[in-house]
């Protein structure tokens, strides 16, 4: 689960990490009052679940309370489009008004889960304040990683190594060490999947402070943190993803035209690769999981069909715990409820596959069957002119 910057900073401050003084404003008048309280100058930031706000016009230095009010009136109620949002952008309902800082150096620091290392890992770079993915791709030597053994926790020598990688020494290295300790405690105690501070700033008077922060929380651990679960802002989510979350379906909306219905994240990734391989683009990542019943499949397919960009459905199911006939009944019911007549390419293997194929074959829907991945690829290629959207065709 994502949360806003102001919420992330509140959590960091609770654990002892220095952050700028600031106020959240929901109206221009509140932004004006907050700027006055901060001495007449401030940084105003749109609060949205997306990065790249600065380049998109979502962050601005204001030189007076009136400036803050004018800028907040433009932001609040608008939709901000950044390189991390779709073309429709995300709504801005609040802004964060913060004190300004005299920045001498911008650094990058994050703690996330490294599945290959089977534990948390700090990622640090002296090249902070910019797109860290681009730094990692073009200058990987500028990225430092420090894994942490959760059995013994973050050790002082590790904090010193990270501080050294950031180019810090003396009191600044000690301050960075305290920041790392705070982040690690928070990460573990709150079941975070990501704590990112970018930039981690060294100010002209030598302080080390989190100028921006992003915290992601593990959805499956929210039952342990009802106070954190209450921080969710559904307005920031894509409507279909919000519906999927409520239906307990793993769904991510994408920009393509082929709706993918699968069970299992690995199979979902392989299926999306297959769609790309034949020259089309997935419309979604939809994993109904292993224990879905008829109702869950109906909800999942309904969510998929609510996307007007979907030109066809690709079913790739390996039915073990999930029975193939449940999937088939759910697909047929959802299509009937929405009067959908999209072409369906189906590969089902496993429990009750014969029954599933019979249900689909007798449904009156336009179904093309495949039994192997090679056959599935061939069916996709055959249906390509129908499955691709106008945008995809124009890219050729």
Image (tube, rainbow, N blue to C red):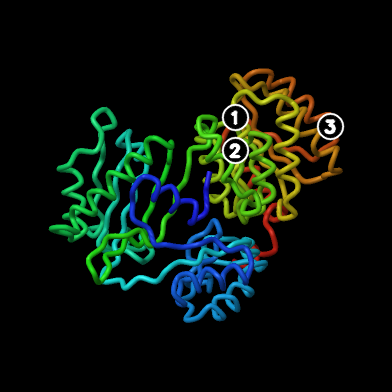
Q: Nearer the viewer, mark 1 or mark 3?
A: 1
Percent position (x, y) of residue 104? 26, 71
**Which residue corresponds to the image point at 71% horizontal and 44% vertical from the top-left?**
304
Q: Which residue is mark 3?
A: 363
| Residue 163 position within the rendered picture, expressed as x and y whole percent measured from the top left | 20, 53
Q: At 54% across and 65% down in the image, what residue appears?
A: 46
Residue 277: which numbered mark, if any?
none
CA gap, disc 1 and disc 3? 24 Å
Marks 2,3: beta carbons within 8 A: no
Q: Which mark is residue 289?
A: 1
Secondary structure beneath label 1: loop
Q: Whole-Å distance between the Cαs marked 2 and 3?
A: 26 Å
Q: Is residue 237 above or below residue 366?
A: below
Q: Residue furthest left?
A: 170
Mark toward the start of the polypeptide (2 vs 3): 2
Sequence-wise, the earlier of marks 1 and 3 is 1
Are circles 1 and 2 on residues that touch, CB within 8 Å?
Answer: yes
Q: Nearer the viewer, residue 216 or 203?
A: 203
Whether residue 199 is situated above or below residue 245 in the rendered picture? below
Say which residue appears at 53% left-offset and 40% top-offset.
228
Q: Dot 2 surroundings within 10 Å: few (below 14), some, or many (20 or more)?
A: some
- Which quadrant is home to the C terminus? bottom right
Label 3, secondary structure: give it. Answer: loop
In three-dimensional space, the C-alpha distance between marks 1 and 2, rounded to whole angstroms, equals: 8 Å
Q: Residues within 10 Å of mark 1 (few under 14, many from 20)?
A: some
- First in residue order: circle 1 vs circle 2: 2
Q: Which mark is residue 250?
A: 2
Q: Nearer the viewer, residue 244 or 301?
A: 244
């Amino acid at each position: 689960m994502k949360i806003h910057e102001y919420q992330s900073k509140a959590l960091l401050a609770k654990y002892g990490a220095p952050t700028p003084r600031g106020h959240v404003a929901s109206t221009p008048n509140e932004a004006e009052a907050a700027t006055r309280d901060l001495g007449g100058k401030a940084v105003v930031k749109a609060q949205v679940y997306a990065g790249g706000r600065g380049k998109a016009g979502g962050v601005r230095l204001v030189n007076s309370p009136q400036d803050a009010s004018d800028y907040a009136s433009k932001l609040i109620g608008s939709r901000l489009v950044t390189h991390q949002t779709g073309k429709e952008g995300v709504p801005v309902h609040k802004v964060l008004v913060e004190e300004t800082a005299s920045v001498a150096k911008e650094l990058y620091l994050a703690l996330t889960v490294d599945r290959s290392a089977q534990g948390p890992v700090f990622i640090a770079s002296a090249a902070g304040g910019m797109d860290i993915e681009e730094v990692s791709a073009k200058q990987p030597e500028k990225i430092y990683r420090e894994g942490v053994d959760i059995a013994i926790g973050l050790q002082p020598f590790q904090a010193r190594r990270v501080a050294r990688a950031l180019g810090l020494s003396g009191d600044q290295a000690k301050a960075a060490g305290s920041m790392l300790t705070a982040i690690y405690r928070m990460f573990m105690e709150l079941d975070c999947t990501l704590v990112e501070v970018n930039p981690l700033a060294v100010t002209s008077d030598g302080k080390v402070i989190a100028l921006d922060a992003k915290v992601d929380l593990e959805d499956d651990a929210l039952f342990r943190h009802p106070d954190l679960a209450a921080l969710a802002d559904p307005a920031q989510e894509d409507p279909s993803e919000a519906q999927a979350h409520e239906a307990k379906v793993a769904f991510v909306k994408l920009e393509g035209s082929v709706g993918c219905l699968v069970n299992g994240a690995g199979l979902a990734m392989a299926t999306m690769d297959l769609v790309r391989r034949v020259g089309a683009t997935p419309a979604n990542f939809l994993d109904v999981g292993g224990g879905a019943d008829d109702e869950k499949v109906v909800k999942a397919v309904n969510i998929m069909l609510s996307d007007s960009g979907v030109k066809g459905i690709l079913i790739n199911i390996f039915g073990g715990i999930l029975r193939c006939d449940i999937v088939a009944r759910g697909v047929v019911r959802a299509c009937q409820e929405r009067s959908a007549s999209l072409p369906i390419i189906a590969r089902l293997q496993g429990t009750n596959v014969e029954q599933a194929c019979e249900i689909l074959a007798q449904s009156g829907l336009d179904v093309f069957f495949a039994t192997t991945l090679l056959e599935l690829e061939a069916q996709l290629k055959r249906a390509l002119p129908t499955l691709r959207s106008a945008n995809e065709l124009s890219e050729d």
